[in-house]
Amino acid sequence: MDKFIIDGGVPLRGTVTISGSKNAALPIMAATLLAPGVYRIKNVPRLRDVRTMAHLLRIIGAKVEFGDHALQIDTRHADFPEAPYELVKTMRASMYVLGPLLARWKRARVSLPGGCAWGPRPVDLHLRGMEKLGGRLELDRGYIVARARELTGAHIYLDVASVGATGNIMMAATLAEGTTIIENAAEEPEIVDLGHFLQQMGARIQGLGSKTIQIQGVTELHPADYTIIPDRIEAGTFLVAGLITGGTVTLTRCRPGHLQEVLAKLQEAGAELHVTEESISLKAAGEIRPTHVTTAVYPGYPTDMQAQWIALMSLARGSSVVTDTIYPDRFTHVPELQRLGADIILKNNSAFVRGVSQLKGAPVMSTDLRASASLVLAALAAAGRSEVLRVYHIDRGYERIEEKLQQLGARIQRVDDGKLY
Ligand code: EPZ
């Protein structure tokens, strides 16, 4: 099991290249099941979750080959429409194969996800969407067993603007007979990227990036090549790293337009920013100013940047409130930040953070992907040595994060802590 050893207190300086988006790559990989053929996907991040999705596609019968930040996926012989529990429990995004399997094979057997560390995460909107499109679903010993004679377009209203449900329903609807309208759809850039990929495959979709997406079903789709958008959460994480350490960092190959709210909050917190089409430069200019954040669906402040923001506010000159309206209990990073000296009180779905003048290094435990990122950020700013344990969590969503941080001057090493569990 790997851990990071971090000697904090070094202002980060330099340039880092942002990788492709995990949350765009995963649904796009699943979408290749919609049409038999060979697909070449570029700007694919090298992440544990991408390898997990590749493994799942192979179980279904696809061939997946990795290139340099590229994938070649051959779905001509995919023929086993199942997603087993041992995979789905490690990665909730495995759910993304449900729509494509049902659309192409008219049957699917997908394990229910195990839910993440911060509480149960239902998939009711995915299931109801499939039923609206004509799927007949039943739960059988922890598996969703879905069948359909054919899929027909439907008018679907999502109670919650779910990213996953929007993606799953959109994929299934591309091969449904007639028109599907998804109301209260997710507007996240990753769903827009999935939609663009589906359009390259011949799907007829309007309204991407708005709350109402319309899909005219077609009888068949065809393979397409594609380049994934940059990861806006990795970008936001590295910008916070620059500000929390009092440094000057430049991100290249990113899409500033995808993280406007995060940029606005960074400026409110005291960062000086210079933005071009594909780069963002941040300069810490003096103290970190306390800045309240409430997460919301896109284009609001992303929940996937909530943990990182609490780490930053731990060192602000004053008090701030960070509220998560998407996942009310996504705060497992708080007790670990407190071990580094952060002064935080949790109440319902808010963290009340009173900035301290200094954090002190200590051993801390990762619990999930973005919690791990917040611990790394705090350790980079803390005085002295920290150990961040179980970094396999962070490897799910950040490509070689320690190497990218080393490029910025961070004193961070990955070591195998010798433990097997
Ligand atoms: C996606 O998860 C992301 N994962 C998550 O990023 C992200 O936190 C989340 O969207 C919110 O932005 C991927 O894209 C692979 P949701 P997803 O369905 O699709 C409720 C990361 O760190 N809900 O938009 O699972 C749910 O409980 C990961 O990269 C239902 O009630 O999120 C939650 O409160 C973590 N019923 C809210 O919607 C459903 O059927 C948002 O969930 C589905 C969701």
Image (tube, rainbow, N blue to C red):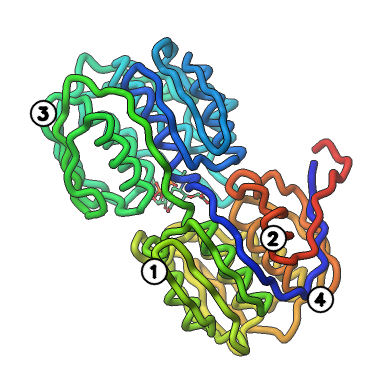
Q: Give the spatial CA distance, label 1 vs label 4.
A: 31 Å
Badge 3 vs badge 2, beta-carbon distance below 8 Å:
no
Amino acid type for the residue under numbered disc 2: Leu
- From the image, tell me which residue sits under label 4: 383
Q: Give the spatial CA distance, label 3 vs label 4.
A: 61 Å
Going 41% across and 37% down the picture, which residue do you hit?
Answer: 27
Q: Position of residue 46 (x, y in %)?
A: 59, 40
- From the image, tell me which residue sits under label 1: 260
Amino acid type for the residue under numbered disc 3: Gly
Q: Secondary structure at mark 3?
A: loop
Q: Quadrant of the N terminus?
A: top right
Identify the mark nearer the N-term, 1 or 2. Answer: 1
Identify the mark nearer the N-term, 1 or 3. Answer: 3
Identify the mark nearer the N-term, 2 or 4. Answer: 4
Identify the mark nearer the N-term, 3 or 2. Answer: 3
Q: Quadrant of the C terminus?
A: top right
The residue furthest left is 178
